[in-house]
Amino acid sequence: MEKKELLYEGKAKKVYKTADEDRFIVMFKDDATAFNGKKKGQIQRKGIMNTAITKIFFELLEEKGIPTHFIELVSDNEILVRGLEIFKIEVVMRNIAAGSISKRLGLEEGTILKKPVLEFYYKDDELGDPMINEYHIFAEELATEEELNTIKKMAFEINDILRDFLKKRGIELVDFKLEFGKDKAGRIYLADEISPDTCRFWDISSKEKLDKDRFRQDLGNVEDAYQEILSRIEK
Ligand code: TMP
Ligand code: ASP
């Protein structure tokens, strides 16, 4: 399918229309940002690596019964996806404390959470994606109760599937962010991407960070970390 006009450009991706009004092409950029766009840079070959990583995870999830927006690869940094109305909610799932939960609750990085923690953020760059709860979601009609129940159930299932898959490959799934959308019939799909940009991955034994925290924290070897994730999950 051919790309038509650019519909939207985000910090890490571009979305193009196609001849089919229900299909879009997502192009993954090498650009990287952090701290709501305050830190900017480039990660060489990130677009290609995140495309390949997202494809593997979305195909795995589809196989396990999770509907995703992924249809097929278009090129090495582009995918064809279903057109969806995206919920203005970022869904974060955490298994181990790191990042903002460590700061907010004073939990040492690496603290194992006794149960996975599900959090919601309002998807709004100008507001800096503030944390919200279910009452905010219903008050602002960001999703109905029924839709949110489906999203929560899918998020926990995705956590189980990914954790198990990654553990076998020597990777700890610390936390990750998901986005969901619905089609015209109201069916809910997993959207966006699953990559080292949107997840924290640690090597199980050394605890080495293999994700965007290497860029956020200037740890070096960013490209190598993304490639390491791709190489381990390709098998
Ligand atoms: P946090 O600890 O900064 O709240 O991040 C939790 C997870 O969500 C982590 O895996 C990174 C991911 N994330 C995004 O994908 N986009 C974002 O804008 C933020 C803040 C986090
Ligand atoms: N992607 C977000 C930003 O640009 C935050 C992050 O991933 O740290 O700021």
Image (cartoon, rainbow, N blue to C red):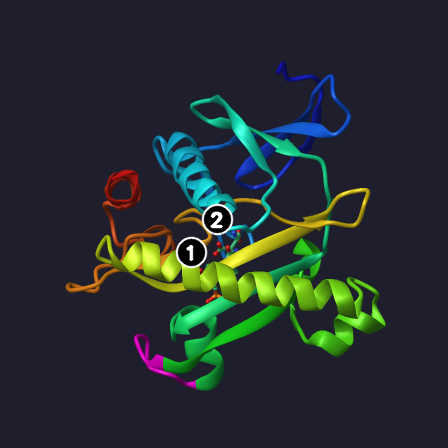
* Occupied quadrant, residue 185: top right
The residue tagged 1 is 199
Residue 123 locus on image (x, y percent): 67, 57
Residue 38 locus on image (x, y percent): 52, 52
| Residue 221 colored in magenta in the image | no
- Tell me the number on the disc at residue 224: none
**Disc 1 element:** strand
Residue placed farthest to the left in the image?
Answer: 206
Q: Is residue 196 above or below residue 53?
A: below
Q: 76 and 190: which one is in front?
A: 190
Q: Tell me if the residue at label 1 has its CB under 8 Å from ligand 1.
A: yes
- Tell me the number on the disc at residue 61: 2
Residue in the picture at 24% in, 48% down: 220
Residue contact at pointers 2 and 1, CB within 8 angstroms = no
Q: Which residues are magenta?
A: 106-112
| Residue 109 colored in magenta in the image | yes
The answer to whether residue 129 of the structure is visible from this angle is: no
Residue in the picture at 68% in, 76% down: 133
Q: 54 and 183: which one is in front?
A: 183
Mark 2: amino acid: Leu
- Mark 2 Cα-neighbour bin, 10 Å: few <14, some 14–19, many ≥20: some
- Mark 1 Cα-neighbour bin, 10 Å: few <14, some 14–19, many ≥20: many
Residue 11 locus on image (x, y percent): 56, 41
Residue 165 locus on image (x, y percent): 33, 54
Q: 191 and 39: which one is in front?
A: 191
Q: Main secondary structure of the magenta part?
A: loop
Residue in the picture at 49% in, 32% down: 29
Residue in the picture at 69% in, 62% down: 127
Q: Is residue 83 above or below residue 222?
A: above
